[in-house]
Image (cartoon, grey):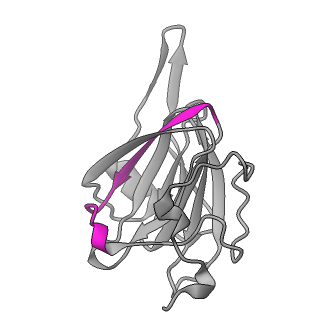
């Protein structure tokens, strides 16, 4: 496993070692001891989630706060997404900066999203199956989020406005300038 730092503090790209031959491939998608050693973190995942979305879906930007804050290790099992992380930790040196990366079944890269960061993705392929490990349980009452099209971040989701599929819940999220922190 190769671990690459991103411009967001404690946000890492994980490149698993893939063994390929004429039969297909094998990879170890996660190893707790290696992960914690190579990132310098002490993460213990407790919940796995999976979603399937069609082209044009934009999910996010979401997080959980307080005692239910979650770190996530995300990857794509089928298709391709543009994955986005916004540092929403007020005391972080990378506060309000964002990072994006294409994750796909082909490149097999994974992204570690630290607690306190907002997360979202857009589906760039016909469909995508998205998988993520979480180090805390889901709690609806601790959800926070910002609109995907917040001008504060000016994120290019690589989906045209007329092709974007966004949930009512995500369309009702606030813009950063309207937050009461």
Which sits in the foreground, 161 or 53?
161
Where on the picture, by quarter, is residue 9? bottom right
Does residue 127 belong to the magenta stretch? yes
Q: Residue 1, position in %: x, y?
A: 49, 42
Does residue 72 belong to the magenta stretch? no
Which sits in the foreground, 21 or 141?
141
Q: Is residue 15 above or below residue 60?
A: above
Where on the picture, by quarter, is residue 124? top right
In the image, taking residue 127 as reference, residue 102 lies left or right, namely right
At 59% from the left and 81% from the top, the residue drawn is: 176
At 46% from the left and 49% from the top, the residue drawn is: 74
At 52% from the left and 77% from the top, the residue drawn is: 88
Q: Is residue 67 above or below residue 148?
A: below
At 65% from the left and 49% from the top, the residue drawn is: 164
Which sits in the foreground, 164 or 134?
164
Query: Over which residues does the magenta segment extend?
Result: 125-141
Query: Most extreme residue toward the top, as rendered?
Result: 22
Question: In this figure, what is the number of numbered marks?
Answer: 0
In the image, taking residue 160 as reference, residue 17 lies left or right, namely left
In the image, taking residue 103 as reference, residue 68 lies left or right, namely left
Q: Residue 53, position in %: x, y?
A: 50, 40
Q: Residue 105, position in %: x, y?
A: 55, 32
Q: Residue 63, position in %: x, y?
A: 43, 68
Q: Is residue 147 above or below residue 13?
A: below
């Amino acid at each position: 496993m190769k671990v690459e730092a991103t411009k967001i503090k404690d946000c890492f790209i994980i490149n698993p070692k893939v063994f390929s031959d004429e039969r297909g491939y094998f990879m170890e998608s996660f190893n707790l001891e290696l992960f914690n050693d190579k990132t310098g973190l002490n993460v213990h995942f407790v919940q796995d989630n999976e979603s399937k979305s069609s082209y044009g879906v934009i999910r996010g930007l979401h997080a959980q706060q307080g005692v239910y804050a979650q770190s996530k290790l995300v990857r794509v099992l089928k298709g391709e997404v543009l994955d986005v992380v916004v540092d929403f930790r007020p005391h972080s040196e990378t506060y309000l900066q964002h990072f994006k990366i294409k994750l796909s079944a082909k490149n097999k890269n994974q992204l570690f999203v630290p607690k306190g960061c907002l997360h979202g993705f857009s589906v760039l392929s016909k469909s995508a199956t998205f998988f993520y490990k979480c180090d805390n349980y889901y709690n609806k009452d601790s959800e926070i989020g910002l609109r995907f099209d917040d001008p504060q971040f000016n994120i290019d989701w690589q989906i045209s406005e007329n092709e974007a599929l966004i949930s009512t819940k995500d369309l009702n999220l606030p813009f950063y300038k309207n937050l009461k922190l």
